[in-house]
Image: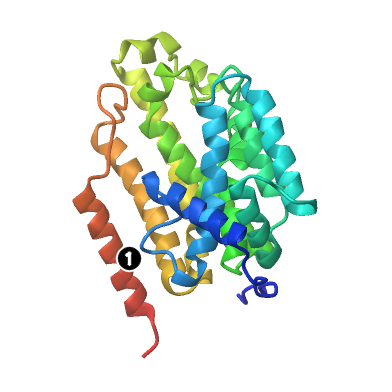
Amino acid sequence: MAAAPRAAEARPESSDLAGAYAHCARMARARYENFSVVSWLTPPRFRRDLEAVYAFCRATDDLGDEADGDRLALLDEWEAQLNLAYSGEPAHPVMIALQDVVRRAEIPPEPFRKLIQANRIDQGTGRFATYADLLRYCDHSANPVGRMVLHVLGAASEENGRLSDSTCTALQLANFWQDVARDYRIGRVYLPQEDLRAFGCAEERIAGGAADEAFRALMRFEVDRAAALFAEGAPLANQLRGRAKLAVALFSKGGMRVLDAIREQNYDTLSKRPVVTRPRKAWLALGAALRMAARRPL
């Protein structure tokens, strides 16, 4: 599939713009996450733009998760800065850099607004009545990031967006199922309430930290759902090239490996958090690179 055309090249940098990008780079390098979009796999020509996108995502999540004071008001102020990035002169360094990125990569405002809205949702009960409600949350909290990245890579299209949504939702679900116990301690239960009832799992069982047969059956059900979404999104890597292709393939492999780790613990995510070890991550990266090289025409 042909890549979407990129917008015109950036205007000459001012010292403020250079400083804004440097600020975003520091934010990206100061935090480690399993599936950070800014890594050694990032194509160098896209790295600075992705650092700006990452900085926006990180700052938004920090407002929703860690900020003191009225978080809803702070998120409203943040959205006002986002609006200025599209139609004015933002003051925050993240938004100054982001304004430059969205103009060149032609990123619409909706993904950024959705992520802010996800953090508003986070100020609620931390519960989701149905699986459909949880998917709507993922559509605001995870899927927008994939859409942003596709625009930066010049690979935004309706089909790629659909595949990206499946992959991003699967990644978020894998993270939720990995962190059931930890999320409960901070007041969040991402297991849909309808599923807890269907499998006879009261929240008190999560609090107790002991996985019984009902909980294991529920987790098996949720893990299978996430695995199906990974399968739906798998063709996305074949629509990309080079390091971008490798990065997307590795993100999916890493997420599926999290699901494997849950299976290996017999679906007990309460007594021990399933993890993917560093050596295993290295093998995943090497395997993905070798497969990509094997498919490359001579």
Q: Residue furthest left?
A: 279
Q: Residue furthest front?
A: 15
The residue at which mark 1 appears reads as: 288
Q: Residue furthest right?
A: 87
Q: Is residue 163 visible?
A: no
| Residue 160 as seen in the image, left or right of residue 273 | right
**Quadrant for the C terminus in the image:** bottom left
Which residue is at 31% across, 22% downward? 270
Q: Quadrant of residue 123?
A: top right
Q: Quadrant of residue 180?
A: top left
| Residue 199 as seen in the image, left or right of residue 112 | left
Residue 279, percent across and down? 19, 52
Residue nearest the viewer, comparing 153 with 259: 153
**Quadrant for the N terminus in the image:** bottom right
Badge 1 density bin: few <14, some 14–19, many ≥20, Cα 10 Å: some
Amino acid tagged 1? Ala
| Residue 96 as seen in the image, left or right of residue 50 | right
Residue 106, percent across and down? 70, 63
Which residue is at 71% across, 31% downward? 76
- Tell me: residue 123, above or below residue 174: above
Residue nearest the viewer, comparing 240 with 58: 58
- Tell me: residue 36, above or below residue 41: above
Q: Is residue 215 visible?
A: yes
Numbered marks: total? 1
Callout 1: helix, strand or loop?
helix
Which residue is at 40% across, 17% downward? 185
Residue 81, percent across and down? 71, 42
| Residue 47 as seen in the image, left or right of residue 210 | right
Residue 210, percent across and down? 28, 15
Which residue is at 62% across, 67% downward? 13
- Tell me: residue 18, above or below residue 45: above
**Which colour style is shown?**
rainbow
